[in-house]
Each structure stands twice: as structure tokens, then as C-alpha cells.
């Protein structure tokens, strides 16, 4: 029998990249695989949580059909889907690699290269920060987890985001290590909570990191 420590708890996990279309064929996105979010969702579900996943486009990611999966494409769609249900959740984990920008003007028809010339300038507009908005509206009884992909000053940047985004837990990983993080099955993280506990973990499979994060949430007596 599994210990059902998270029975009765509702959890939201967002994962994967977002896609910002310029015209019907050109798109601004990234290569997030959704693996880290899926590992956390699965670990929480195994421990009895009722898990909702808001997923960006992750065609090759397998998710068990027991999870409630809402599929979205753009950052604005992900923002709406997450904010709609966030207030009903006990635990919220934002692993998604959300595009910070979208195109200001999006032509409805495919734009011909011959119309564009050899240099093209496209104007971008900032997307809302989903995690920040969830943290702003939070109840103190909720437990909110954010991620931070950093290329330098990992620990100080992570601690700044923990505070600025009103989180309980931040998980930060370097983006400049080969075979680690984005698009990989392994990761190396610095993890810190709002109550003074901090740890640096070695390179581990994302499945193990997912379970360890969920254990941390349970230790925090959510
Ligand atoms: O500020 P930064 O983008 O580094 O923060 C990363 C964290 O914020 C991640 O948890 C990510 O899911 C979340 N985020 C978000 N909406 C954005 C940008 C980042 O929810 N527009």
C-alpha cells in the first residue's frame, strides 16, 4: 500500500513550453520537454493528491490518464487556465517555461518572405507572469512552488524570486550545463524554502527530483 499522505489535497502543476505564433506558421517557443513537471505531478498523484496539469505543447510527453490535463498553447491561454483554478488548489507548482513575450501584431495570413525584405524587425509585448499573479492572489494556507532557470548567481537569484513571487519553495537549476535541465532527463538543483531550509542536490534523474520535491512539500505539513 502507498502512503496516501496527500489524500484530499488538490494540486495544480503547469508544465512544458508555450507557443507564441507570429503568423499561422512562424512561432516563438523553447525546447522545454515538460519532464520535470510530469515527474512532480506523478509523484504527488502516487501519494494521493488530486492533480490537475495545465500543459503547453508537449506532444512526446506521456502523462497517465488519471490526471486531469488541460492543454494550452500560448502564455495568455496558460495564464487564464491556471488563474481560473488556482484558488481551488492546496498546492501549486509552476514548472512551465513560459514565453516572456508575445508578438504585438500577428498577421492572420502567412506573410510572404518576398514582402519582408532582408532585415525584419518584429515588435514583442511582455506576457503576464503566471506565477507572480498566483502568488499575489494566494491564500496563506496554499503551498506555492516556483522554478528558476539561471545561468549565473543561481542561489541569490533563486532567493530573490522566492521572495518577489511570494512563494513557499523555489527550485533553481543551471541552464549552462550539458545533459542537464532543459530537454534532459536529469537535473541539478538548488532548492530553498521560505522558512530557511536550503539544499543543493547533485545531478539526479528528474523522476527522483520530483519525488524529493513532493516529500519536501509533505515535510512542510501542507
Ligand atoms: O522570473 P523567471 O521567469 O525566471 O521565473 C521562473 C518561474 O516563473 C517559473 O516557475 C515559471 O514557470 C514562472 N513564470 C511564469 N510566467 C511567466 C514567466 C515565468 O509563471 N511569464
Image: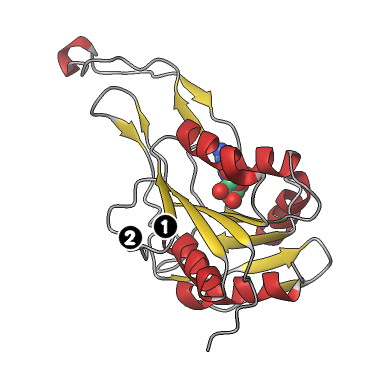
Residue at horizontal 47%, vertical 72%?
A: 206
Residue at horizontal 55%, vertical 69%?
A: 44
Quadrant position of ligand 1? top right
Q: Residue furthest bottom?
A: 1
- Sequence-wise first label, 1 or 2: 1
Relative to 116, is 173 above or below?
Answer: below
Residue 158 on image: x %, y %: 69, 56
Q: Quadrant of residue 153?
A: bottom right
Asked if residue 83 can be seen in this view, the reply is: yes
Which quadrant is the C terminus positioned in?
Answer: bottom right
**Residue 61 tag number:** 2
- Verify CB contact (< 8 Å) between mark 1 and mark 2: yes
Residue at horizontal 30%, vertical 18%?
A: 119
- Return the residue at label 1: 34
Relative to 213, is 125 above or below?
Answer: above
Of residue 18 and residue 154, the one placed in the foreground of this image is: 18
Residue 154 on image: x %, y %: 65, 59
Amino acid at each position: 500500500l502507498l502512503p496516501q499522505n496527500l489524500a484530499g489535497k488538490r494540486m495544480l502543476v503547469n508544465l512544458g513550453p508555450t507557443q507564441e505564433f507570429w503568423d499561422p506558421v512562424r512561432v516563438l517557443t523553447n525546447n522545454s520537454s515538460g519532464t520535470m513537471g510530469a515527474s512532480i505531478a506523478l509523484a504527488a498523484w502516487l501519494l494521493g493528491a488530486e492533480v490537475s496539469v495545465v500543459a503547453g505543447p508537449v506532444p512526446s510527453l506521456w502523462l497517465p490518464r488519471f490526471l486531469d490535463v488541460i492543454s494550452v498553447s500560448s502564455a495568455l491561454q496558460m495564464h487564464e487556465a491556471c488563474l481560473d483554478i488556482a484558488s481551488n488548489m492546496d498546492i501549486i507548482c509552476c514548472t512551465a517555461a513560459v514565453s516572456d513575450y508575445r508578438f504585438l501584431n500577428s498577421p492572420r495570413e502567412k506573410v510572404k518572405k518576398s514582402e519582408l525584405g532582408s532585415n525584419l524587425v518584429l515588435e514583442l509585448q511582455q506576457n503576464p507572469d503566471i506565477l507572480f499573479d498566483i502568488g499575489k492572489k494566494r491564500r496563506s494556507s496554499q503551498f506555492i512552488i516556483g522554478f528558476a532557470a539561471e545561468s549565473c548567481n543561481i542561489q541569490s537569484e533563486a532567493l530573490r524570486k522566492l521572495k518577489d513571487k511570494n512563494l513557499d519553495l523555489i527550485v533553481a537549476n543551471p541552464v549552462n550545463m550539458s545533459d542537464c535541465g532543459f530537454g534532459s532527463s536529469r537535473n541539478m538543483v538548488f532548492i530553498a524554502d521560505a522558512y530557511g531550509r536550503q539544499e543543493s542536490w547533485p545531478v539526479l534523474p528528474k523522476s527522483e527530483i520530483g519525488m524529493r520535491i513532493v516529500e519536501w512539500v509533505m515535510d512542510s505539513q501542507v
